């Protein structure tokens, strides 16, 4: 008897088909992940700018009640983005200083309290740090450091 047996039909995928599918998924991931990271950075930066503007509004309310900015304190101090984050989860740290002497907080006895400066420092080297002052200066610079004088920074 000549054994003309039919081989059972194979189910599943060949190694080549799996490798092609894996390459396609890898290409999509290579495109999508950097795009998502950029979107996430922009979102956090927008939160920092929004917080700075809210603090500026609170500063003006404080001045309208007290005729100066002395003894203004943010809660928490410093403000962090995202709110309530600690440790490596902090994306931005926002501080308020005396605009005439940025080494002093507005609670310092040597503060004049006639102007203010707000700095939002990014913890991500690929994101922007921001400065905003009561004199109308708004600037940003990529990286984790920026000076209150805005040297090397761009306006926003």
Image (spheres, rainbow, N blue to C red):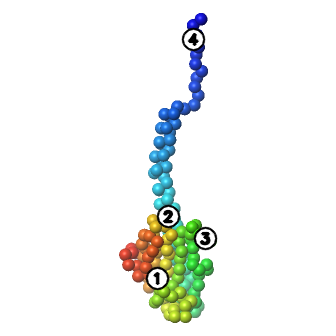
Report how far apart the C-alphas of labels 3 and 1 lie in the structure.
26 Å
Question: Which one is nearer the viewer's eye here, 17 or 60?
Answer: 17
Label 2: which residue?
41
Residue 86, disc: 3
N-terminal label among 2 and 3: 2
- Packing grade of label 2 (10 A; few <14, some 14-19, many >=20) is some
Q: Is residue 126 above or below residue 18?
A: below
Label 4: which residue?
4
Residue 133, disc: 1
Report how far apart the C-alphas of labels 2 and 4 lie in the structure.
65 Å
Q: Which quadrant: the C terminus?
A: bottom left
Residue at image point 44% right, 81% down: 148
- Packing grade of label 1 (10 A; few <14, some 14-19, many >=20) is many
Q: Residue 57: x, y in percent?
A: 54, 81
Question: Which one is nearer the viewer's eye here, 55 or 35?
Answer: 35
N-terminal label among 3 and 1: 3
């Amino acid at each position: 008897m000549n054994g003309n047996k039919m081989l059972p039909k194979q189910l599943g995928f060949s190694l080549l088909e799996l490798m092609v599918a894996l390459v396609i998924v890898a290409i999509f991931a290579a495109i999508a992940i950097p795009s998502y990271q950029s979107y996430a950075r922009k979102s956090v930066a927008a939160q920092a700018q929004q917080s700075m503007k809210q603090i500026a509004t609170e500063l003006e309310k404080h001045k309208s009640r007290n005729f100066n900015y002395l003894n203004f304190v943010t809660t928490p101090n410093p403000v962090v983005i995202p709110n309530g984050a600690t440790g490596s989860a902090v994306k931005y740290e926002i501080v308020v200083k005396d605009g005439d002497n940025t080494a002093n907080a507005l609670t310092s006895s040597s503060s004049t309290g006639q102007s203010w400066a707000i700095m939002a420092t990014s913890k991500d080297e690929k994101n922007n740090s921001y400065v905003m002052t009561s004199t109308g200066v708004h600037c940003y610079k990529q990286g984790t450091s920026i000076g209150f004088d805005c040297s090397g920074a761009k306006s926003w």
